[in-house]
């Protein structure tokens, strides 16, 4: 039987939240730069790179959602483990 380590899971949640914040900040910078470039770029190559940007934007959004879901999953597992631990403590006075 394996044991769920609440401390390690909590640390993972902290690290994932930090990662998510960095990801959001960095992508916001990329989006701002893209909008600046979009306003001045008027040649035949723009549609190609616009498609690349849109793909990256979709990938970023999907990654953000996956990280958020994983954080919620870990928080749920932590709550379950804490409840189970409390029940076990009540059974063993």
Image (tube, rainbow, N blue to C red):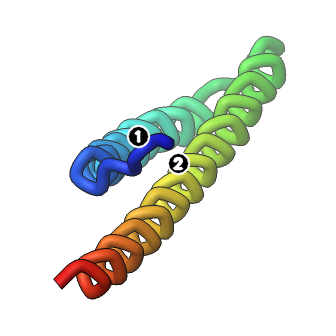
- Give the numbered dot on residue 82: none
Q: Earlier in the sequence, mark 1 or mark 2?
A: 1
Instruction: Residue at 40%, 66% (x, y): give it.
Output: 81
SS assignment at label 1? helix
Q: Which of marks 1 and 2 is in front?
A: 2
Tell me if mark 1 has few (under 14), some (14-19) or many (20+) residues whose alpha carbon lies within 10 angstroms of its own. some
Q: Quadrant of residue 46?
A: top right
Residue on which disc 1 sits: 23
For residue 93, say whether it is visible.
yes
Instruction: Residue at 63%, 47% (x, y): give it.
Output: 61
Disc 1, disc 2: CB below 8 Å? yes
For residue 25, say whether it is visible.
no
Task: Pinpoint residue 57: horizontal percent, then vertical percent.
Answer: 65, 39
Depth check: give the residue in front, 17 or 59: 17
Instruction: Residue at 39%, 65% (x, y): give it.
Output: 78
Instruction: Residue at 74%, 23% (x, y): give it.
Output: 52
Task: Pinpoint residue 50: horizontal percent, then vertical percent.
Answer: 74, 28
SS assignment at label 2? helix
- In the displayed structure, 39 sits above or below 92; it is above
Measure the alpha-carbon separation of dots 1 and 2.
10 Å
């Amino acid at each position: 039987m394996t044991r769920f380590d609440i401390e390690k899971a909590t640390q993972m949640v902290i690290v994932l939240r930090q990662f998510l914040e960095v990801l959001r900040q960095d992508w916001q910078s990329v989006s701002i730069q893209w909008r600046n470039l979009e306003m001045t770029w008027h040649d035949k190559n723009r549609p190609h790179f616009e498609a690349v940007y849109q793909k990256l934007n979709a990938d970023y959004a999907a990654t953000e959602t996956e990280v958020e879901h994983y954080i919620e999953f870990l928080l749920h597992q932590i709550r379950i483990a804490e409840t189970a631990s409390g029940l076990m403590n009540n059974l063993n006075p």
